[in-house]
Amino acid sequence: MTPGKELLFCALGGSGEIGMNVNLYGCDGKWLMVDLGMTFSGNEYPGVDLVFADLEFIERERENLIGVVLTHGHEDHIGAVPYFAQELGVPFYATPFTARLVRGKLEEAGLVNKVELNVVDDFESFQLGPFGIRYVPLAHSIAEGNALVIETPYGRIFHTGDWKLDDEPLIGVPATAKELTAIGDSGVLAMVCDSTNAFNPEASGSEGGVRDGLLAEVGKHRGKRVLVTTFASNVARLQTLGEVAEATGRQLCVAGRSLDRILTAAQASGYLKNFPPTIDARAAMNLPRGEVLIVATGGQGEPRAALGRITEGHHDIALERGDVVLFSSRQIPGNEIAIGRIQNKLAADGVVNVTDRQSPIHVSGHPGRPELLALYSWIKPEILVPVHGEMRHMSEQARLGKQAGIPKQVVQKNGDLVRLAPGKPGKFGEVRAGRLLLDGDIIAPADGQGITMRRRLALNGIVMVALDHKGRAEVAGLGLPLEEDYDAFCMEARDDVMAAVGKLKGAMRKDREAVIEAARLAARRAATRWSGKKPQVQVVLMEA
């Protein structure tokens, strides 16, 4: 669908879920994309690591797509860039730190010379077709979090990206209340706003407060080895941990490839100028336990991250009874089991776990209700469009906006076509907004046959039937809970298959599909009778 003389909005990812943000604005025959993120897989996609938004709709409109503007460098906003940038074939725009992260991804993919990546400074304006765009810096849990002011012939958009209010951000200089009020005074048609913490009655808190909390907590554990796990992308937290290490007389060790990449990109962008020199894992282990502070990836329970490997004894760093791990990060929904597994293993080894429930060692990067209300009062939009949240978060923000006096609210989900202007704002259609999976080296549909079959195999196992031209059969099963009864099951299932095939008469006996179906049903009934499971059954006909 090509936009007409109107202003449209459509999310292909990030509305109705937290993560995988992909937003589209349509105007005067052109589309603008804001962010191109991904999310990490859960148990619903066995064997899969990364999940992407299905871009089928905008790929069909590729000739009308004029660019992709990236708000900041978190994976749920830039993670899909190396997988789709070349195919989209349009220029990308980012501020310096985000651009360095994206360029690193493009280099790894061998695409650095095949994708146009433009670097834009804060508050700098540029024009893409009918869209005038300006970055507005806001605080977030990464350097260079930005909102976008998007000018169109039909009204001005304030797209918040991910944000919070922070009186002591440590990294970067966010726009002031006065600057944001000036944007609102110039007239804002719609604010498209982060909903992640819409239920939180309190403000998210300051990074400066985390510094005080971490300093106090690390100071409690004299003579103990302390490891802090945090999001690698949180440059302000890295700055904090550098200061804490120096203040407590500890040398700093950094463990994790993503931390190394972020440190390199941050320092190249002018951040972390006074960051203390780091030592490697072996040097850290040779120091007295109370003289080292370790910063490691893996706070979300990722088994291959540094903390996961340390916990399992597969890393040069080792933790001993009495050592301390500080979880200076938010528990992302869906990761509870993985995080709990690591924390339980640490506890079993006598290592002390400390989270933000016990000590003020983390603050969110997303706005609580007081911050949302403050931004509403400054921006004064006519329309509120909640994004970046599950449906309950977005609906709650819409209610909050209505209570605050915003005249109109539009609650949408991935794939909804929303007309913002002219006329009454609201949904008027739908487009495809599915999911794609990085499955091995292949990007495949989440509802495709491959992942559907794998899910069934994980639930019920598989039975294999080999049948020759004389009706003789062999049966084998995988994933059935039969253990001691396995051989007896295979013999009975074999007899059932041969009996079922032997009952076929006339033309049916020579019908390949009829023979396969008779064998399949007989084997499946036998498996259900023996195990209560309904496995997948694969029948192979052996030719004469």
Image (tube, rainbow, N blue to C red):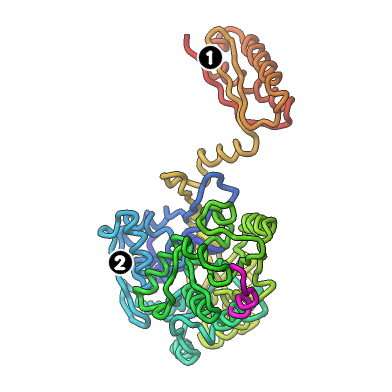
Residue 428 in sight here = no
**What residue is drawn where x is 52% and y is 86%?**
168
* Residue neighbourhood size for the residue with mark 2, other residues' Cα within 10 Å, grouped as few (<14), some (14–19), many (≥20): many
**Residue 148: percent from left, percent from top:** 42, 77
As for residue 453 lying within the magenta part, the answer is no
Question: Is residue 89 rendered to the left or right of residue 197?
Answer: left
* Total number of numbered discs in the rendering: 2
**Residue 530: percent from left, percent from top:** 73, 25
Q: Amino acid at mark 2?
A: Leu
Residue 469's disc is: none
The answer to which image quadrant residue 492 occupies is: top right
Mark 1, residue position: 511
Of callouts 1 and 2, the N-terminal one = 2
**What residue is drawn where x is 56% and y is 47%?**
45
In the image, which residues are magenta?
Answer: 215-226
- Look at the picture and state if 197 lies above or below 428: below
As for residue 219 lying within the magenta part, the answer is yes
* Separation of residues labelled 1 and 2 (CA atoms): 59 Å
Q: Secondary structure at mark 1?
A: loop
Mark 2, residue position: 117
Question: In the rendered image, which quarter contains the N terminus?
Answer: bottom left
- Look at the picture and state if 189 lies above or below 489: below
Q: Which residue is at the front of the view, 418 or 361?
A: 361
**Residue 48: percent from left, percent from top:** 51, 47
Q: Amino acid at mark 1?
A: Asp
The answer to which image quadrant residue 154 occupies is: bottom left
**What residue is drawn where x is 52% and y is 64%?**
296
Q: Which residue is at the front of the view, 16 or 321?
A: 321
Q: Which residue extends farthest bottom?
A: 178
